[in-house]
Each structure stands twice: as C-alpha cells, then as structure tokens.
C-alpha cells in the first residue's frame, strides 16, 4: 500500500507542476535552410479558462492540505512554517471551494483528517469548475492510507 501511495503522490505532484501555460508546437522542417519558428505561449482570458485555473489552484491546495508536512518539506519549509502553510491551504479550500466560513473549525478538521464526505464535496466543486476531481480523490485515498 505504501508503494501505491508513493506512486499516487508522484502522479499528483507531476500534475501539480504541469499546470502552467502550454506551448504550441510547430512542425519542424527537414530542410536545414528553413528557420524553425519559436514556440509561442497559448494565452486566453476567457471565463472558462479562469474557472479551470481556479480548479487547478484548488487541486494543488488539496495535495498540500492532504499530504501536510511532507508537501511543505519538499518545498523547503521547516518547523512551524510547514504546519501554518498546510492550515492555510486547507482554509483556502474550505472557504473558496466549499464556501465555508474562515472560522469553521469543524470543516477545517474534516479536511485535515481527509474525511470522505469533505473530499467528495471538494471533488464536486473541482469538477464543477472544470478540474480533475478524480485525481484529487485518488490522492486523498492514498494520503488517508499513508496516515
């Protein structure tokens, strides 16, 4: 089971790191005399893209919330800083994705404990905004198993 948790953590980390702008690939020419165009960054500011960015931010916050100190340790945080950053990520999910009040300690505790009901509510919010809730669910299951 620990190996499964490690694989899911690595997959989630790869997905979390791949959320930046996408490069548009141009076909290369076989001829050496034809210059190859530089890739251009594909940018769009539609409302749908903003929703997907929000969902991606929530996915990343979920990975940090569910894995706790190990996520922050990988980012270079030490000591109390790890706990504070984890709580901040969980509160972001609680207020933005789930619509709870910032002082709702019960909602915070359920997210930090990776309770199935809280995870399903979060997955529904992420899916509603165009994210990948299934990945968050798998990561939550792996993190719960690792606990």
Image (cartoon, rainbow, N blue to C red):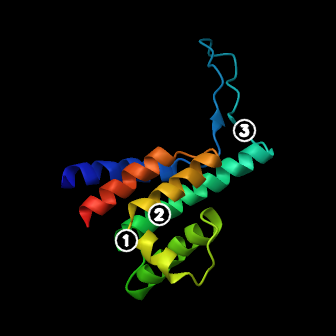
**Can you tell which quarter of the image residue 97 is in?**
bottom right
The secondary element bearing badge 2 is classed as helix
- Horizontal side, residue 146 vs residue 121: left or right: left
Task: Examine the rendering and report whether any part of residue 75 can be seen.
Answer: no
Whole-number angstrom distance, CA of label 3 to CA of label 1: 39 Å
Residue 91 position within the rendered picture, expressed as x and y whole percent measured from the top left: 55, 75
| Element carrying mark 3 | loop
In front: mark 3 or mark 2? 2
Mark 2 neighbour class, 10 Å CA radius: few under 14, some 14 to 19, many 20 or more? some
Which residue corresponds to mark 3? Answer: 42
The residue at the point 63 percent across, 47 percent down is 128
Q: Position of residue 48 (x, y in %)?
A: 74, 44
How busy is the neighbourhood of tag 3: few (under 14 within 10 Å), some, or many (20 plus)?
Answer: few
Q: Is residue 136 left or right of residue 20?
A: left
Observer-nearest residue: 109 or 85? Answer: 109
Eyeballing the image, is 92 above or below 143? below
Quarter of the figure that contains the C terminus:
bottom left
User: In the displayed structure, would residue 14 be above or below residue 74?
Assistant: above
Q: Residue furthest right?
A: 46
Looking at the image, is 89 positioned above or below residue 3?
Answer: below
Structural distance between the alpha carbons of marks 3 and 2:
35 Å
**Which residue is labeled 2 in the image?**
118
Q: Are marks 1 and 2 in contact (CB under 8 Å)?
A: yes
| Frontmost residue, 7 versus 103 | 103
Q: Which residue is mark 1?
A: 113
- Look at the numbered disc 1 and give the secondary structure of its residue: loop
**Residue drawn 50% across the image and 48% down it:** 133
């Amino acid at each position: 089971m620990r190996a499964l948790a490690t694989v899911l953590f690595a997959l989630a980390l790869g997905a979390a790191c791949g959320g930046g702008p996408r490069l548009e690939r141009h076909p290369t020419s076989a001829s050496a005399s034809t210059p190859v165009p530089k890739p251009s960054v594909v940018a769009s500011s539609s409302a749908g893209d903003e929703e997907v960015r929000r969902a991606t931010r929530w996915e990343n916050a979920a990975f940090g919330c569910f894995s706790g100190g190990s996520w922050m340790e990988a980012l270079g945080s030490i000591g109390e800083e790890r706990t504070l950053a984890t709580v901040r990520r969980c509160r972001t999910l609680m207020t933005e994705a789930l619509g709870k009040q910032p002082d709702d300690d019960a909602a915070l505790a359920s997210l930090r404990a990776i309770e199935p009901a809280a995870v399903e509510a979060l997955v529904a919010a992420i899916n509603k905004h165009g994210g990948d809730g299934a990945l968050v669910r798998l990561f939550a299951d792996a993190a719960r198993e690792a606990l």
